[in-house]
Image: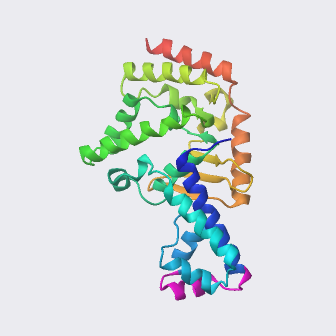
């Protein structure tokens, strides 16, 4: 699979981080020792090793010297950094977007852009990638009513811009679950919700989107409102990431054991969901009830 330009930049950061981590481990050094040489905390070293940032032009030679990297290893790392920095800037790197999203919430934008597939349980909300503008605006009007108009508009535009991953040259594959309550909540009023339900039916017809609803009738599974996403990337060497929606924003983890645990959670919820065809019929019936 050919990944997008932005995805290549992200993977370059990851490759550099993993290579520097390998060199440090082989040198028998801890992150604190590397941080002392650079004049930074071990958290900055950790950030580089986790592929969240390239080392600066000043930091890189110090690390390579400390780790006693061979000329071949040095050349490989430098080439990867140069290649990664040569790619165009992503839409989410604009200052106005960075002003609204921070920490893991900001990092999530790049991970979703780089992903090959996501498994998402959106709980009591319509899955974000399948939301209409009016639905997003209604959520923002309630949840961010104390924020500035500019900030709210940036959030809405970012939510809609994210959806481009579904229609790009190599589209993201989405396997989405949501609760019946997400479909019955009349967000934005009947007209907005009818349009949202029709949009879901349209999305479900796309070959790269699987949408299933967990109905009230199945019992306990229908009240599991905690939202989470599993992000899978192309290439066997790129670890999957779990994202959870918290009050303060996204929380990301890539621990393999945690990813496996959340996959089991998703599979268990999926076992209680309607199949794709039944889901579409279910959505259509709810829409009729709003008419």
Look at the picture and state if 120 lies above or below 40.
above
Residue at left 70%, top 79%?
Answer: 70
Q: Image point 43% across, 23% down: which residue?
A: 193
In the rendered image, residue 117, in percent from the top left (x then y), is placed at: 65, 41
Q: Residue 162: x percent and y percent? A: 47, 40
Q: Is residue 29 magenta?
A: yes
Q: Nearer the viewer, residue 171 or 101?
A: 171
What is the basis of the colouring in this image?
Answer: rainbow
The quarter holding residue 158 reads top left
Please determine whether, in this image, residue 179 is positioned above or below residue 60. Answer: above
State which quarter of the image contains the N terminus.
top right
Which residue is located at x 73 percent, y 59 percent? 257
Name above or below for residue 285 compared with residue 41. above
Judge from the rendering whether residue 223 lies leftward or rightward of residue 137; answer left or right.
Answer: right
Would you place residue 238 above or below residue 200 in this image? below
- Name the foreground residue: 14 vs 83: 83
Closer to us: 207 or 104: 207
The answer, for residue 276, to whether it is visible in the render is yes
Quadrant where the C terminus is found in the figure: top left
Q: Position of residue 170 (x, y in %)?
A: 61, 36
Q: From the top left corner, tell me how far across and down residue 69 is, in percent.
A: 67, 80
Instruction: Tell me where the magenta segment starts and ends, as one range.
Output: 26-41
């Amino acid at each position: 699979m050919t990944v997008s330009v932005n995805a290549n930049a992200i993977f370059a950061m990851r490759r550099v981080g993993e290579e520097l981590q390998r060199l440090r481990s082989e040198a028998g050094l801890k992150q604190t020792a590397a941080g002392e040489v650079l004049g930074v905390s071990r958290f900055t070293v950790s950030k580089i090793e986790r592929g969240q940032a390239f080392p600066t032009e000043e930091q890189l030679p110090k690390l390579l010297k400390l780790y006693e990297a061979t000329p071949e290893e040095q050349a490989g790392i430098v080439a990867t950094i140069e290649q990664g920095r040569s790619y165009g800037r992503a839409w989410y790197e604009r200052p106005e977007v960075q002003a609204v999203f921070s920490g893991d919430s900001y990092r999530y934008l790049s991970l979703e852009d780089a992903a090959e597939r996501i498994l998402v349980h959106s709980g009591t909300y319509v899955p974000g990638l399948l939301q209409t503008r009016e639905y997003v605006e209604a959520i923002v009007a309630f949840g961010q009513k104390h924020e500035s108009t500019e900030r709210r508009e940036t959030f809405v535009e970012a939510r809609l811009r994210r959806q481009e991953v579904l229609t790009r040259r190599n589209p993201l594959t989405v396997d989405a679950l949501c609760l019946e309550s997400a479909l019955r909540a009349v967000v934005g009023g009947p007209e907005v919700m009818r349009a949202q339900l029709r949009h879901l039916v349209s999305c479900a017809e796309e070959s790269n989107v699987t949408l299933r609803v967990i109905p009230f009738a199945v019992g306990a599974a229908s009240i599991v409102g905690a939202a989470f996403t599993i992000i899978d990337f192309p290439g066997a060497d790129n670890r999957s990431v779990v994202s959870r929606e918290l009050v303060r924003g996204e929380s990301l983890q890539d621990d393999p054991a945690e990813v496996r645990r959340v996959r089991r959670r998703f599979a268990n919820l999926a076992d209680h969901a309607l199949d794709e065809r039944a889901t579409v019929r279910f959505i259509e019936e709810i829409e009729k009830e709003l008419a």
